[in-house]
């Protein structure tokens, strides 16, 4: 049986590994940390192509992922399709609305739009709660004969020697591993709160004032920040105050949210997702830099990747 090594155990590594297994490949995941210690484990996570490039490829991957989630709604695995209000302006990229199945998106009526937002779409989109979905994916990977090894890879030479084919899904870790000057963090601070009786919605139309609410099965995630090139992983009280203030001032909620936990994560942002074989180490395929949309496009990348690798193995 052909074998491939995937480096990284976040949403991108796990989806890549599973799609390769579905092509009959024996897969080993090598990772500095298990799925529960990754950036992926900390987030929302709602289907929305936010801060991911290039637009056309991201749209295609997002559409493939949407279909994958449709087929993956299972009791207890964290996947659900929920109504989501998304603000837009004339300057917004609204191409994502064209990707959704007929009947699952429409313009919102003024009466349906939270205060502070002028125009919005209401769509039905996948939510994949990481605390349930990542263990589900990991168990699916292991059940199919996958092997997991905890190990830090320090150079591309070392990565290249792991196997005859390697998939690099190290997220922001690729900055050091690949000496990638394009890859940088976009810092996101979020607040996990007790469940609230308000609709899930997002307003990403104002750079530096990202505001969203995601209602999940047991809690509610309120965001956020979108600070470019900010490596700060400390929780900043000033950011929490700002996040809550925006929700209250914008009229998204009348009640002050009851905070359970504050969380910081660094989105692996790039001018374009790196999705290619390495020029110097041609047995290494890079799949990193998914910005604010790893859950939105991860499955799509994995489907395309598995096809490329299948051709390569032939
Ligand atoms: C606050 C916040 C909210 C977000 N909300 C959403 C959302 O609602 N929807 C959405 O689609 N996306 C969202 N995102 C973006 C999404 O979380 C990321 O795009 C995604 O987690 C990236 O996944 P990844 O697998 O590439 O990286 P990671 O989850 O960081 O995984 C990288 C893996 O590589 C391993 N690794 C790194 N370096 C090495 C090394 N040198 N050797 C070995 N292993 C290594 C790590 O241990 C880890 O296992 C959000 C991000 C943040 C921060």
Image (spheres, helix red, strand yellow):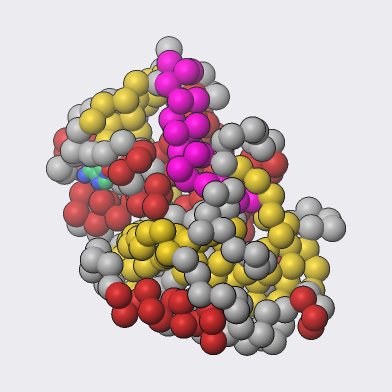
**In the image, is residue 144 part of the stretch drawn in magenta?**
yes
Assign the magenta stretch its main secondary structure. Answer: helix
- At horizontal 37% and vertical 59% (from top left) the residue drawn is 261
From the viewer's perspective, is residue 170 above or below residue 124? above
**In the image, is residue 116 part of the stretch drawn in magenta?**
no
Q: Position of residue 179 (x, y in %)?
A: 20, 57
Taking depth in this image into account, of 17 and 281 the one nearest to the observer is 17
Q: Position of residue 142 (x, y in %)?
A: 42, 21
Taking depth in this image into account, of 218 and 131 the one nearest to the observer is 218
The magenta stretch is 126-145
Taking depth in this image into account, of 95 and 120 the one nearest to the observer is 120
- At horizontal 69% and vertical 49% (from top left) the residue drawn is 81
From the viewer's perspective, is residue 163 above or below residue 195? above
**Residue 274: in sight, yes or no?**
no
Give the left or right position of residue 82, taking residue 174 as reference.
right
Give the left or right position of residue 179, taking residue 299 as reference.
left
**Residue, far right:** 103
**Residue 257: in sight, yes or no?**
yes
In which quadrant of the rendered view does residue 269 lie? bottom left
Q: Position of residue 12 (x, y in %)?
A: 43, 44
- At horizontal 31% and vertical 65% (from top left) the residue drawn is 185
């Amino acid at each position: 049986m052909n074998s491939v090594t995937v480096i990284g155990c976040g949403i991108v590594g796990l989806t890549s590994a599973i799609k390769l297994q579905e092509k009959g490949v024996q897969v080993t995941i090598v990772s500095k940390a298990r799925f529960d210690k990754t950036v992926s484990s900390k987030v929302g996570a709602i289907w929305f192509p936010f801060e991911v490039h290039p637009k056309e490829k991201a749209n295609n991957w997002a559409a493939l992922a949407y279909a994958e989630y449709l087929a993956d709604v299972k009791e207890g695995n964290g996947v659900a399709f929920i109504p989501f209000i998304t603000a837009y302006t004339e300057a917004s990229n609204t191409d994502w609305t064209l990707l959704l199945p007929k009947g699952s998106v429409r313009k919102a009526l003024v009466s349906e739009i939270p205060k502070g937002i002028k125009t919005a779409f209401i769509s039905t989109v996948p939510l994949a709660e990481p605390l349930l979905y990542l263990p589900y994916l990991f168990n699916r990977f292991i059940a199919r004969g996958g092997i997991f090894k905890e190990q830090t890879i320090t150079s591309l030479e070392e990565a290249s020697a792991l196997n005859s084919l390697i998939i690099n899904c190290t997220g922001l870790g690729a900055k050091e591993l690949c000496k990638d000057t394009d890859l940088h963090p976009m810092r996101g601070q979020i607040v996990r709160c007790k469940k609230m009786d308000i609709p899930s919605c997002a307003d990403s139309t104002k750079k530096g004032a990202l505001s969203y609410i995601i209602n999940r099965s047991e809690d509610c995630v309120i965001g956020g920040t979108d600070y470019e090139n900010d490596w700060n992983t400390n929780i900043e009280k000033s950011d929490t105050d700002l996040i809550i203030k925006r929700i209250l001032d914008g009229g998204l909620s009348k009640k002050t949210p009851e905070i359970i936990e504050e969380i910081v994560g660094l989105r692996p942002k790039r001018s374009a997702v790196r999705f290619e074989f390495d020029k110097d180490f041609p047995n290494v395929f890079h799949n990193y830099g998914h910005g604010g949309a790893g859950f939105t496009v991860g499955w799509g990348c994995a489907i395309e990747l598995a096809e490329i690798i299948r051709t390569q193995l032939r």
